Amino acid sequence: MGRIGLPEIILILVVFVIFFGPQKLPEIGAAIGKAMREFRKFTKSK
């Protein structure tokens, strides 16, 4: 499998904006960041 490049990231962001609208993006980003922090904390504690 290849890595995700800049064009793929841009495409994903465009899809998020279309589905959720620009007002919801900060909330979604915060939720994803919180989930990633909790996952890292959980994997380091094991």
Image (spheres, helix red, strand yellow):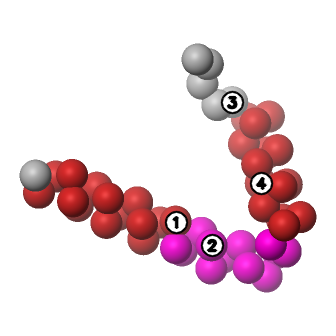
Look at the numbered disc 3 and give the secondary structure of its residue. Answer: loop
- Please name the residue that numbered disc 4 is placed on: 13
Q: What residue occupies the far left of the structure in this picture?
A: 46
Q: CA distance from mark 3 to mark 1?
A: 20 Å
Q: Nearer the viewer, residue 8 or 6?
A: 8
Looking at the rendered structure, which numbered label has been put on residue 41? none
Residue segment shown in magenta: 20-31
The x, y position of residue 3, in whole percent, is: 60, 24
Could you tell me which residue is drawn at 61 percent across and 19 percent down?
2
Look at the numbered disc 4 and give the secondary structure of its residue. Answer: helix
Residue 19 in the magenta stretch? The answer is no
Picture quadrant where residue 45 is located:
bottom left
Q: CA distance from mark 4 to mark 2?
A: 12 Å
Q: CA distance from mark 1 to mark 2?
A: 6 Å
The x, y position of residue 11, in whole percent, is: 82, 44
- In primary-sequence order, the first of circles 2 and 3 is 3
Could you tell me which residue is drawn at 80 percent across and 72 percent down?
20
- In primary-sequence order, the first of circles 4 and 2 is 4
The amino acid marked with disc number 4 is Leu
Looking at the rendered structure, which numbered label has been put on residue 32? 1
- Please name the residue that numbered disc 3 is placed on: 5
- Please name the residue that numbered disc 2 is placed on: 28
